[in-house]
Amino acid sequence: MIDHVGFEADDLPRSARFYDAIFFALGARRMFESEHAIAYGVTAPEFWLVVRGRAPAPGYGHVALRASGKAAVDAAHRAGLEAGGSDDGRPGLRPQYGRRYYAAYMIDPDGLRVEIVSRR
């Protein structure tokens, strides 16, 4: 149903460092890069970061990225923190969302809430 999703970034190189680390840990890669945009995916560019010439509003959204298991959630969370993100919820079970819902939360360099989740 969704072809791709895009989020605005204030400083594309700074945001790219953060998302390079997370997507590498999740098995995705950069599939497009220009002066004003970067896109990530596995077989096609699906997650886009674009520069519009203005900063995104703080707390402007939430995106959940699928991980293949708990170890991948842990690795992506650790990589995101090391690449400039801030913790917004350590990795762990979230039974309020389901018996096997394991997730971690971060805030990216522009204020977007990023969730890494596995349902395994």
Image: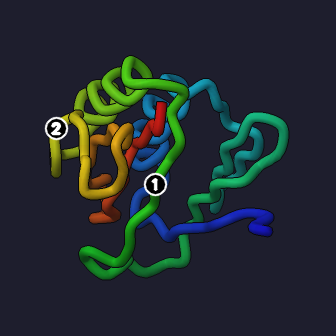
Where, by quadrant of the figure, is residue 59 drawn?
A: bottom left
Give the residue drawn at x 48%, y 30%: 120
Residue 43: image x %, image y %?
83, 37
Q: Residue furthest right?
A: 43
Residue, disc 2:
90
Total marks in image: 2
Q: Mark 1: which secondary structure?
A: strand
Q: How is the image coloured?
A: rainbow
Residue 89: image x %, image y %?
16, 46
Give the residue drawn at x 71%, y 52%: 34
Residue, disc 1:
64
Q: Is residue 107 above or below residue 9?
A: above
Which amino acid type corresponds to the residue marked 1 in the rendered image?
Ala
Q: Is residue 49 left or right of residue 114?
A: right
Give the residue drawn at x 66%, y 44%: 40
Q: Is residue 2 above or below residue 105?
A: below
Residue 25: image x %, image y %?
48, 23
Q: Is residue 103 left or right of residue 3?
A: left
For disc 2, the neighbor class at 10 Å (few under 14, some 14 to 19, many from 20) is: some
For disc 1, the neighbor class at 10 Å (few under 14, some 14 to 19, many from 20) is: few
Residue 41: image x %, image y %?
71, 41
Which of 117 and 106 lies nearest the eye of the viewer?
117
Q: Residue furthest front?
A: 99
- Measure how far apart labels 1 and 2 are at the Cα level: 15 Å
Give the residue drawn at x 73%, y 63%: 4
Which of 94 and 11 lies nearest the eye of the viewer?
94
Q: Is residue 17 above or below residue 79?
A: below
Q: Mark 2: which secondary structure?
A: strand
Which amino acid type corresponds to the residue marked 2 in the rendered image?
Arg
